Image (cartoon, rainbow, N blue to C red):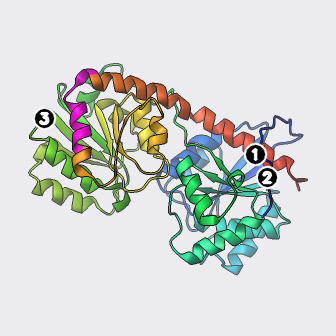
Amino acid sequence: MPEIAGWKACATSMPQPLNILRVITWLPPGGIERKILEALPRLDRARFRPRVLCLRERGALAAEVEAAGIPVDLIPFRSRLDPWGLARFLRYLRRHRINLVHAHMYRASVPSTIAARLAGALPVVSQIHNVGTWESARQVRMDRFLNRWRRGLIAVSERVKRDVIERLRVPPEFVRVIYNGVDLDRYAPAADPSRAKEAQNFAADSIVVLMAARLVEQKNPLGFVELASRLAPRFPRAQFALAGAGPMAPAIRGAAEKAGLGARFRLLGHQADMIPVYQAADVFVLPSFKEGFSNALIEAMACGLPSVATDVGGNAEAFGERQGGLIVPPGEADRLEEAAAALLGDGERRAALGRLARERAQRFSLARMVEDVEALYEEMAEARELP
């Protein structure tokens, strides 16, 4: 495995823009893909020319990425080691004179690493977005082998970094943490909270408890329904909203109906713009069983929402030492209820914690994320003679 010199920062003027290729399986409207859409147009075009390559299908966000000035191409792979796909990938790297490859998640990272190696040891970095991302021992062995051809790994939180080090048996200096970032100019507290509630069809005097996530098991949306069923009798002004889409939607509707929540529980579905939803809420809850570094959590914090989250992935890192939110153990419904009730029953505490959350969110600005990525690209470029 090649060593990297501590990923030390460099500020070198490049003679011409670097051709950067971001590789991902596809571009659905998810958190990872949204960050690509937000970050790539902000790269300094005097130094970097980014493009995106999908390896399964383009996805719903591809048109938005292209509208932002980033080319999106497709090479459909039948499997991660598809020889025809790899041959096309190799030709693609040469045709577009790619200088650096940045791949996301296991299924894109495997063919990206092999194609970059075939292209003449092209610098490649693999980004890991969650803990326990490998589905089998075979995948772990594959990534351990391919790391010898990578310049390094990116983890989205310190917790993900620890998981990567343990599972892939790499030295700490081989893994860099780059946190997800949020646009603090757009994600901000509501100027008029009552009007923000009414715009989302909530009562102006209600206390809105919000969860935003994909409706999948690891996010524990049924835990949010159970929380709502526990809190509703205790707090008559409380209303509950779950924003997101996914395969568990029917089960969530059924659980809410069975709990008798009626109009006090709303399943909002996918929201193209979450900012008005965050601004209409009073408390944010994230009861996940598993996380890497939650985009929804830092977005809620940037909007000044006091939050309750389970102690998984980078949630505690998001809150920081000053506790910009309340952390509870995963899967403990009583502790989750206790923490949420403490906020619902105390408006002054909600306001104070919301201010702390907004302050803490400054650490996770989109501008800082872009700066970290740019520094990484320059370091990778300096480590070898570019093609």
- The answer to if 342 sits in the magenta stretch is yes
Report crowding for label 2: few under 14, some 14 to 19, many 20 or more residues within 10 A (C-alpha).
Answer: some
Q: Between tags 3 and 1, which lies in front?
A: 1
- Secondary structure found at label 1: loop
Residue 114 in the figure: left or right of residue 330: right
Q: Mark 2 points at which residue?
A: 4
Q: Earlier in the sequence, mark 2 or mark 3?
A: 2
User: SS for tag 3?
Assistant: loop
According to the picture, the residue beneath numbered tag 3 turns out to be 235
Q: Which residue is drawn at 73% across and 72% down?
A: 88
Q: Distance between the residues labelled 1 and 2?
A: 6 Å
Q: Which residue is drawn at 67% across and 69% down?
A: 144
Q: What residue type is labelled 1?
A: Trp
User: Is residue 14 rendered to the left or right of residue 35?
Assistant: right
* Distance of label 3 from label 1 (alpha carbons): 51 Å
Q: Are marks 3 and 1 in contact (CB under 8 Å)?
A: no
